[in-house]
Amino acid sequence: MCLSVPMQVLALEAGGDLAVVGRGERRERVNMLLVGPQPIGTWVLVALGFAKEVVEQDERVLIEEALAALAASLDGDYDARAYFGDLDRDRVAAYPARAGGAR
């Protein structure tokens, strides 16, 4: 399994077939053939050196929230109530826990 990460198009190369994308301080050259040339500033999901999908702002917010939750869990500081505000918490709480205590 691979994790796709939102990155912003910073520059185009090779007629738009390649792009330099960035996220924070990280920069990467990616293949754009799956999504086609995109304007500078566009956010794309990147995995394994390929831009796989163009990401709209509302979707990117949800992805960033999920990545923040993952980082918090890896740091041992995860509080489920602080993440995934888009979920209907009453409906999720109504589901019984699976075997082994996992939800």
Image: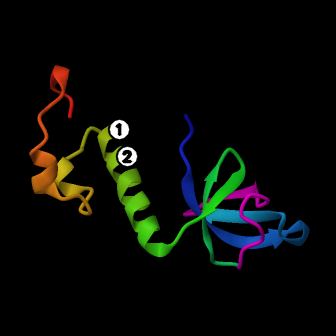
Report the disc number at residue 71: 2
Point out the image quarter for the C terminus. Answer: top left
The secondary element bearing badge 2 is classed as helix
**Where does the magenta region start and end?**
23-39
Q: Distance between the residues labelled 1 and 2?
A: 5 Å
Based on the picture, tell me whether residue 27 belongs to the magenta stretch: yes
CB under 8 Å between discs 1 and 2: yes
- Residue 47 vs 99, above or below: the answer is below
The picture places residue 21, in percent across and down from the top left corner, at 68, 64
Seen as rendered, the residue at the extreme top is 100
Based on the picture, tell me whether residue 25 belongs to the magenta stretch: yes
For label 1, the residue is 74
The picture places residue 56, in percent across and down from the top left corner, at 51, 72
Tell me the amino acid under the disc marked 2. Ala
- Residue 65 vs 9, above or below: the answer is above
Tell me the amino acid under the disc marked 1. Leu
* 103 and 3: which is toward the camera: 103
- Residue 47 vs 39, above or below: the answer is above
Give the crowd class for mark 1: few <14, some 14-19, many >=20 residues within 10 Å: few
Q: How many labels does the image show?
A: 2
Point out the image quarter for the N terminus. Answer: top right
The picture places residue 14, in percent across and down from the top left corner, at 90, 66
The secondary element bearing badge 1 is classed as helix
- Left or right for 77, reference 45: left
